Amino acid sequence: LKWKASVTLIFCLMQAAVSLIVFCLASVVVSQSISFSSCPLFTNEEFGGSAECGTFRTVGDYTTGEGEVEIFIKRVGGQSSSGNILWMIADGPGLSGAMFEPIALQLASALRDRYTIYLMDHRGTGQSTPNLHCPLQAGETEESPEGNCIEFLEDTYGDTMEYFNTKFIARDYILITEELTDPGDTVLLYGAGYGGFIINNILLEDPDIADAVVLDSILLPSVADSDINAQDTGLDLVDRCQSFGDCREQIDRRDPEELVEQVFRTFGSLDCPGQLGLDFAELQTVFRNMASDQEYRALLLPVTVRILRCNSEDLVYLRTGIDNFTDLFYENNRLRETNSSITEGQSYVLRNQIEITELLRIERGFQPSSQELLATSEQLFFSNYFPTFISEVGRNWNWDEPDDFNSFDFADSDVPMLILAGEFDMEVSSRYSARAADNFDNEFQRFLEIPFGGHITMYNTPTSSGVQCGFELIAEFFNQGEGQFSPQDISIACIPQLVPVDFAAEQPRTLELSVSTFGNVDPWGSGFVPGDGVDITGSLSSNYVDFPFSTNNLPPIPDLSLSRIIVFDTYDSSNPQTFRNTLSYLSTGILPPSMFFSPDGAVVGTSSVLFMNLSLFVCLLLALL
């Protein structure tokens, strides 16, 4: 028995040694200090401004300690010698920190320069090295890497492609934060879209790293649902016309959802699409893009009416406008974004890598094929077929998600947190923010959905004062200071000042867009409004306000004919049936159904330390026996 115990003990010690080696390898980092030097504020140098830039060299694979990458960092405003920092974490996947260059100084000023703002080019993007890309050849784009591009990635990066994932990006933030700060310094995290997903993974690894966090329009899996989510949001958008008397008059009090539905359900028998040379998918994409744009969405219903009616005047309006809008959306808009640094340093390869390996998977059931996703998107009105695209590219993708990574895990953190979402976000449904709020639900964590808002509330929540409501909320929250961060205490005075969507298409800016894009100052045209819809709004007054509701005691609502003012706070989920059904009733389609919530909450992934301790425990127990 003694020799058996000795052998068992030796085996256990060997296993413990292996476990320790694995743990140590996971912690290996190329240690270095970051040296900053002066650099242009804008990556596109012609716009001037100054900042400081530096690089941080670290391992490629935090699990094995293999490889090396270099992370580019830019800092703006504040006191560079201070350890009080604010990370602005970029959307994407695939966007670089340059997307925040146009607003970084403005935010630093709003925070009275108490924090130095840091922008990171995530590994694989921007000025970080390597920058994942494909050399373009005839008939190829970086957005759609096929054929030789896939071969190029395999030949150039091979297995090191798996260095580029959210888990390691989160680890980059943690290590660089440790390098930049000392105990007692204040650390703030702001993440937009995919940046919010990164923050959740930062908190999974280090729940106490930050003093305050903002998740703005957080992106969560699954990408497979993006067209379905856009359908729900797009129909919510057009349905809001019913709450504005002038809009109801323009469509002869018909149901606006039925008008949009009629365009696509009767597509084959309509005259205009054929005369315009528009196929079904092209029109879906036009509707999706118009609904996504903060200004052009006001012209969506006029375009719908004209497609259905299709008289000679309508045909000219649509032929001119749809061509121009497509050019503007894909060319001039891209140029504007490039000039404002939004897409500087973007890596489509990194986008595809993370979308395919981390965000495409659904949580339950069978993963739909690209053919099944295509069939779903073909039934909708606001599809851009991105799920099909990512699924199809993924068929030839040879790399996997990182080990011990579950994209559906939520962190368990009590950090003060403000979760923001735009009601009409066509890119990332506000139901994802509701899912996050169901997890982050203590008294210092709060969810606000901003009426009429679009994707990234810092940019797309205009008010009558000219300031973005999301920007005001974020600045006030971060200005509260260490030990005082409480999103419950911030003012929401900007909510009643929100500029509603111009559903009646009668405001000067909408008329200007109608002229410049469609060649006619009259968005609606003349003639009857087609359709067999039932008049469901005839009994409503022009000042109708649908379900005015708030848990925040909003200031008096001005006469903006708002359809509803909804400000979600986090809520006690101990009685899901009561609370979720009530909120869903007040804001149909905003909160997800119960299937999105796991009954036991978030599950934090175990670490190698836990693995080692459990292994030792079992082995020692066997030895003792």
Image (tube, helix red, strand yellow):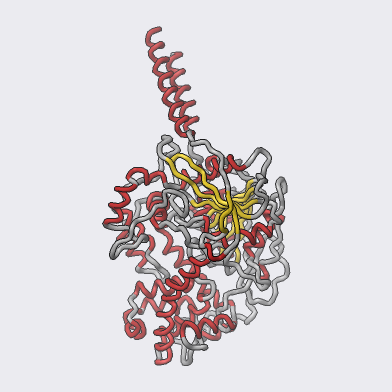
Q: Is residue 443 left or right of residue 383?
A: right
Farthest-out residue, top: 2
Could you tell me residue 293's position as x and y percent?
A: 50, 71
Q: How many marks do you count on the picture?
A: 0
**Residue 377 sits in which quadrant?**
bottom left
Going 53% across and 53% down the picture, which residue do you hit? Answer: 196
The quadrant in which residue 226 appears is bottom left
In percent of width and height, residue 473 lies at 66, 60
Query: Percent x, y for residue 121?
Result: 50, 52
Residue 9 visible: yes
Q: Nearer the viewer, residue 15 or 184?
A: 184
Residue shown at the point (56%, 48%) measured from the top left: 439
Q: Residue furthest front?
A: 38
* Nearer the observer, 458 or 241: 458
| Quadrant, the N terminus | top left
Quadrant location of the C terminus in the rendered image? top left
Please state the horizontal and vertical placement of residue 271, each as a whole percent of the image.
Answer: 34, 86
Residue 4 is left or right of residue 139, and the answer is: right
Where is 279 relative to 349, above or below? below
Q: Nearer the viewer, residue 38 or 263?
A: 38
Q: Quick check: 505 above or below 130?
A: below
Q: Is residue 488 visible?
A: no
Q: Is residue 440 left or right of residue 266?
A: right
In this view, the residue in front, 290 or 585, is 290
Left or right of 258, for residue 374: left
Q: Residue at x 66, y 38 (%)?
A: 183
